[in-house]
Image: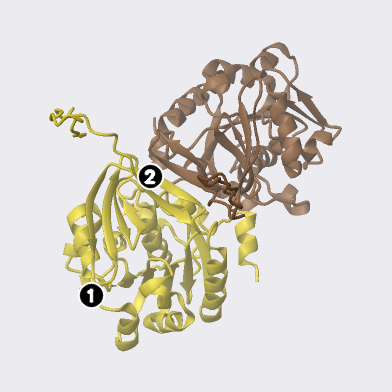
Chain colours: A yellow, B brown
Amino acid sequence: MSISKSDKGKTVVATGVDTPWDLRYSELHSGDSGLTFKIERVIEATRSEFQRIDVLESKQFGKMLALYGSLMVAENDHNAYNEMISHVPLFTHPDPKRVLIIGGGDCGALTETLKHTGVTSCTMCEIDKQVVETSQKHFPHLTSGVDDPRAELLFRDGKEYVKESDDKFDVAMLDLSDPVGPAADLFQKPFHRDMYEKLTDDGIMVAQSESPFYNGDAIKAMWANLRDIFPIVKLYTCFMPIYPSSFWSFMLCSKKYDPVNDFDESRWSMNPLSTRYYNPEIHRAAFAHPQWVKKLLEE
Amino acid sequence: MSISKSDKGKTVVATGVDTPWDLRYSELHSGDSGLTFKIERVIEATRSEFQRIDVLESKQFGKMLALYGSLMVAENDHNAYNEMISHVPLFTHPDPKRVLIIGGGDCGALTETLKHTGVTSCTMCEIDKQVVETSQKHFPHLTSGVDDPRAELLFRDGKEYVKESDDKFDVAMLDLSDPVGPAADLFQKPFHRDMYEKLTDDGIMVAQSESPFYNGDAIKAMWANLRDIFPIVKLYTCFMPIYPSSFWSFMLCSKKYDPVNDFDESRWSMNPLSTRYYNPEIHRAAFAHPQWVKKLLEE
């Protein structure tokens, strides 16, 4: 609404017409190229003990959660990231019972995991309680798993938990933000070795591994490290429209089961889950890569 | 470089320091969300009889061609679009000899097609000669096919050519810009019916069909129309980082061969082509779709 005074001191009545609102969120790789959205509404803009937390709304993506200035989830992202980090290992392992999530504060992976009726417990170790609270407030469809009696939420440093606890898991997910700031250590080899020890003898770990398009060097480093530790390491990808380049990757690290050759879709066929992205065909297809990605993984 | 004169008429020596150059290209869906790039250099900015033609350069994507203000190809797009529109039908058909491309002015599809030694002729019908000339000048790696004796370039309206010519083709590609402006008719059912008639009895047509993320309605309409005409219609996708949402689709329309069930990769195994994106695994995987895309295609 524009309010002004004339030169002669008379009050000019405000027109009641807003100036066009053009608030724009951009997430650019090296300040050069990336995604940009028009923001209709800033719903919450706060800061926890650990990071900046924003909840924004855009026409195309609906409500979106940004941590430390990076988009994490959106109502209209088709839930690709959460479903692919959880269902791919959970359908690769023939009978996953105990599940660990490191990070995962938006609770999307937790909620997807608990759709598996065979899972008996899902421990989520998230350092920032405020992320969980903010997600519960604004993204109820992502956080319904929190109320499941099989969910155990620990608000503490994942690295310490993994070092100190004696628990073993069938499936573990490193549902981390980018390899900068507080999560940086959780992308490194010493932590991955500790994670190997947290798994049962036929356990599976999945780590989110950034965008093949923008983060080739990070992927190469993770790939080399993880292949030193696990006998089976496979990259897979999904289309995630709010992440840099929209093309996102994960590394599945396994002691026994191969995610394609040992994948048995009968569990899905008998009891398909309600998903927006994952299905058995996309499970298999996610492990096929363009020539340029295959080249990236050559040693 | 800033040059100025002082108030008193003395010439102030230019500092030699440029003002920071921040030229930005953005391609936004409904003015709301999309891609944005920093532009290092505008190499050419011109207008043909039909459209605006720009050649830009960015650090991330290298040289890029934009037609009517939309990005078409870039040096660093991994050639995904051109390889997927051509190699998927050319490796689905067991022995493609005669190929037709409608549009395709950057010549990328032509060049990929002529990598197939069994192809005896490739007719490209592009209305705008200036697009071909601009591409030849700035994108030599895309346009090398033009010099192949099997290439026949016609600079005329594709719709008229298809109506008037008696030629038949094993594979045809609708390598068109978006369904607005001069190409709009080429996305409609009457033209698709004419294309059906241009194919041999076991012929295959591929049409680029926009982004499933942004253009769901256009995809639904094309899907319904094409399934009225062809016995086999399959959607496939690729990761194309300079197109809206980076997630792009094609419809393969076939009289006889199924692109997955009838796909025989022995031709590739015996003689793999030099590609940056396409390979037999990605050929198959491109036909698997997330739940939300499958839902889009339900009738």
The image's mark for residue A155 is 1
Q: Residue furthest top?
A: B164
Residue B157 is situated, as x and y percent measured from the top left of the image, at 67, 17
Q: Mark 2 highlights which residue?
A: A37
Secondary structure of residue under mark 2: strand
- Residue at the image point whose x is 36% and y is 56% from the top: A71
Residue A1 is situated, as x and y percent measured from the top left of the image, at 20, 34
For residue A15, side relative to residue B31 (left or right):
left
Q: Is residue B267 above or below residue B137?
A: below
Is mark 2 in CB contact (under 8 Å) with mark 1?
no
Residue B279 is situated, as x and y percent measured from the top left of the image, at 65, 51
Residue B234 is situated, as x and y percent measured from the top left of the image, at 53, 36
- Residue at the image point whose x is 82% and y is 32% from the top: B120
Identify which residue, B45 or B136, lies in the foreground.
B45
Chain letter of the residue beneath label 1 in the structure image? A
Q: Amino acid at mark 2?
A: Phe
Identify which residue, B205 or A159, lies in the foreground.
A159
- Residue at the image point whose x is 78% and y is 51% from the top: B271
Q: Quadrant where the C terminus of chain B lies?
A: top left
Identify which residue, B280 or B186, lies in the foreground.
B186
